[in-house]
Image: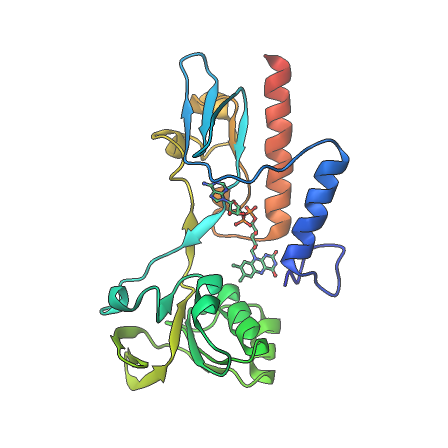
Amino acid sequence: MIENYPGFPEGIPAARLVGRFIEHLQAVGGSVERASVERISRNDDGTYTVSTPFEADRTRAAIVATGTRPRMVAIEGARAAQGHQLFYDLLELLERAEPGERIVIYGGGDAAFDLGLNLRHRGYETAIVCRSRARCLPLLRARAERDGIRVMEGRSITRVASGERLTLELDGASPVEADRLLIACGREPRLDILEPPLGALLRSDDTYAAGVPGLYLAGDVAADGRRQVGIAVGSGINAAMLAEQYLRRR
Ligand SMILES: Cc1cc2nc3c(=O)[nH]c(=O)nc-3n(C[C@H](O)[C@H](O)[C@H](O)COP(=O)(O)OP(=O)(O)OC[C@H]3O[C@@H](n4cnc5c(N)ncnc54)[C@H](O)[C@@H]3O)c2cc1C
């Protein structure tokens, strides 16, 4: 649920907002193709090659808006539990979990609280463990309290023991039992499709100066920690205008 995108005072489900963006794109003659990009590389003539498992397209300009991936945490025992009892992705967790199960979310930001509320509304018993004080929107904190989500602040998970259920050992508190653990401890830019050193060069608006004219970053992949749909949309418009100016100059 996107709570704070201008023009939607009641909030709007993310999937519906994306659907509206696609309709808008199509209305002005754009199209969406679904494929996983494996690589973007720069050619000697200044064009770029965008490779998917099916084809390699040449383009004079490209905007990379690949978002972020969850940041992995180093917890003893985590690797053995990952994929069946420990998850970084809500959809992967939902493929395994049954309503009524106890899910612990590890993290204290908006995403952790949003995920906790989402799971609570799907009929799971949820609790949130955060390493420091929760730093989510006060609105999300109030909703978690309203929905009876237990929040344990100032607690690190030091070890995960996998059995029929998970035992989560906490720093300075008694262990907690759970059926699954969902980790929401920050995110990092998803830049791995860019052939080195393109990713490092691109973190600048002036891609001429950076030596990669015609290639732009937009949205969360370019954000310095402030991840919001409104900011992502603005940075997409900025990248589109820069790309258009670049193509016109050429
Ligand atoms: C739980 C949660 C709650 C949030 N709530 C809010 C909120 O209430 N308000 C708000 O403003 N923001 C919220 N955000 C943040 C918001 O979702 C992001 O800021 C926004 O989605 C960023 O848009 P983006 O297009 O840059 O990246 P994303 O939305 O992450 O989109 C990136 C896209 O790129 C695709 N992709 C990645 N790699 C490849 C590849 N190799 N090939 C092809 N496609 C690829 C991904 O599949 C994805 O579709 C929330 C985020 C989370 C996780």
The quadrant of the image that shows the N terminus is bottom right
Q: Which one is nearer the viewer's eye here, 41 or 245?
A: 41
Please give the name of the residue rendered at 64% of the width and 42% of the height, measured from the top-left corner. 234
Residue 246's quadrant in the figure? top right
**Which residue occupies the extreme front position in the image?**
54
Viewed as shown, does residue 42 lie left or right of 61? left
- The percent position of residue 73, horizontal first and vertical second, equals 31, 62
- The percent position of residue 201, horizontal first and vertical second, equals 40, 30
Please give the name of the residue rendered at 55% of the width and 80% of the height, measured from the top-left corner. 123
Please give the name of the residue rendered at 43% of the width and 77% of the height, measured from the top-left corner. 103
**Which residue occupies the extreme left position in the image?**
76
- The percent position of residue 32, horizontal first and vertical second, equals 62, 38
Q: Describe the colour scheme in one phrase.
A: rainbow
- Determine whether 147 is above or below 45 in the image: below
- Determine whether 199 is above or below 102 in the image: above
The quadrant of the image that shows the C terminus is top right
Viewed as shown, does residue 121 lie left or right of 46? right
- Determine whether 158 is above or below 45 in the image: below
Please give the name of the residue rendered at 56% of the width and 74% of the height, measured from the top-left corner. 117
